[in-house]
Amino acid sequence: MHVKTEHGVNRRPASAPPSPRRQAAALLCFLAVSHGVSFLASLVIIENAGGWYAAADKAPWTPPGWAFGAVWTVLYTAMAVAAWLVWRQGAGLPSGRSRGAMTVYGILLLLNLAWAPLFFGIYPMVGSAALWLALLVITAHAVAAGATVVRFGLISRAAGLLMLPYVSWVVFSLSLNAYAAASN
């Protein structure tokens, strides 16, 4: 492989993919971040699921509790792989395009992390206002998820497709949140 040297710094050609070792390390990092967000959000959910939420009026289409954990585990893994695919493709793309996609993804993760404390954690303190605030956050979350699909899809079709189930589940979760806000 030919490596250019500019100002004493070795630079890989823009089109060369990252090494397999670097790709594996990056995939592990994306998985760790994604499942780290999942773990942090689940702490608040687990703490409150048996309390006020167990007695709350829930939408008739609410799945059993175990389904949420199973679905989210698959979704967090898929979104990590999607982000990794975008990162991997970024080696040959203009940095602004991949950076913009990863910025939207970061916003998506933050909104994902913000929702559980609002919906589950703050409700005992402020009541239904927490559910309405959580509804605003999950609406922004759904918009960010849609933007992530588009941004990822422009870089890697597979990455965009991997994010589609995530968008569907967030919109479904939004419907559950809206019902809970209106009914509790």
Image (cartoon, rainbow, N blue to C red):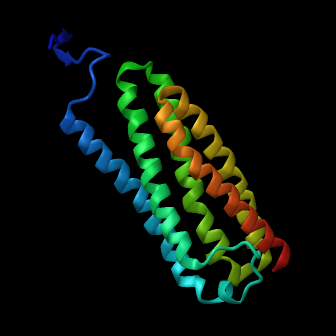
Q: Position of residue 172 (x, y in %)?
A: 69, 60
Q: Residue at x 73, y 72 (%)?
A: 61
Residue closest to the eye, 6 or 82? 82
Say left or right for 3 vs 45.
left
Q: Position of residue 89 (x, y in %)?
A: 39, 27
Which image quadrant is residue 20 in?
Answer: top left
Q: Residue at x 75, y 78 (%)?
A: 58
Q: Position of residue 65 (x, y in %)?
A: 57, 78
Question: Where, quadrant-wise, is the N terminus in this rendering?
Answer: top left
Q: Residue at x 75, y 58 (%)?
A: 136
Residue closest to the eye, 72 or 115? 72
Residue 133 shows up from this direction: no
Which image quadrant is residue 177 in?
Answer: bottom right
Tag count: 0
* In the image, farthest residue toward the right: 182
Q: Position of residue 15 (x, y in %)?
A: 31, 16
Residue 181 lies, with reference to residue 72, above or below; the image says below
Question: Where, quadrant-wise, is the C terminus in this rendering?
Answer: bottom right
Residue closest to the eye, 115 or 88? 88
Q: Residue at x 35, y 32 (%)?
A: 88
Say left or right for 54 vs 180.
left
Say left or right for 166 vs 15.
right
Residue 76 shows up from this direction: yes
Residue 75 lies, with reference to residue 69, above or below; the image says above
Say left or right for 4 vs 127.
left
